[in-house]
Amino acid sequence: MSARPTPIDDSLYQYLLSVSLREPEVMRRLREETQRLPEANMQIAPDQAQFMQMLVHLLGASRTIEVGVFTGYSTLAVALALPPEGRIVACDIEEKWPRMGQPYWKEAGVADKIELRIAPARETLTALIDEEGPDTYDFAFIDADKENYITYYELCLQLVRPGGLIAIDNTLWDGKVADPDNHEPETEAIRSFNNHLHEDDRIELCLLTVADGLTLARKR
């Protein structure tokens, strides 16, 4: 038995999906439509979406935040995991991509749980702190512009209650974070973010080898 994660090639990944994935048909169709886009790599994987749904269930979450919506696949996943009174504030800077997901949200019967706010996420998160106060959300998912990850994290950390969870996507960045010769701005931003969380004693921390790296930060 290896002490490291098992390397995942295409055949093993397909096996993983075949024995684990329970993706609702409406989610599958949105995912497949998104996969036809040139920007399809911005969408999370279906096994990651299912994992996030389990996290929402384990937390008993009813109030959630998403920073970076894209076509709304992850939004739909979280909304489907919420109780009837649940709510997700979905932050994006443009309507183009979320508009693709909105018919699927409606079809799935969760459109009324999703509050889409089109504005810079920094402004939306700051407004939520002013409107509702700190410690008022259970779960947050960050998957947006990497240079602002620390800003989004700090604002979400104010909004999430003690015991609440922040999940952050792309924190392994296709392995580039471990390449000392790679100094691309997004790579450097994620390195700084990872170091920032590693030194943050306000949270319990775990960086998982899920998809492109998924960091979980539980607020103490």
Image: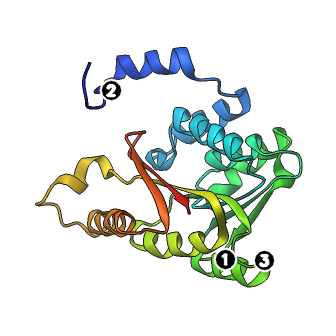
Q: Nearer the viewer, residue 75 or 7?
A: 7
Marks 1 and 3, the one that precedes in the sequence: 1
Going 52% across and 74% down the picture, which residue do you hit? 154
Residue 74 placement, left or right of 189: right
For mark 1, give the secondary structure.
helix
User: Mark 2 or mark 3, which is nearer the start of the sequence?
Assistant: 2
Identify the residue under disc 2. Answer: 8
Residue 77, given in percent of the width and then of the height, sits at 67, 42
In this rendering, is residue 33 above or below 18? Answer: below
Label at residue 124:
1
Bin the neighbour count of mark 3 within 10 Å (Cα to Cα): few under 14, some 14-19, many 20 and up.
few
Residue at the spot of label 3: 132
Q: Is residue 74 found left or right of 192 in the rendered image?
A: right
Mark 3 residue element: helix
Residue 113 image offset from top left, x and y in percent? 83, 54
Residue contact between numbered discs 3 and 2, judged by CB atoms under 8 Å: no
User: Which quadrant would the N terminus be assigned to in this image?
Assistant: top left
- Circle 3: residue type: Glu
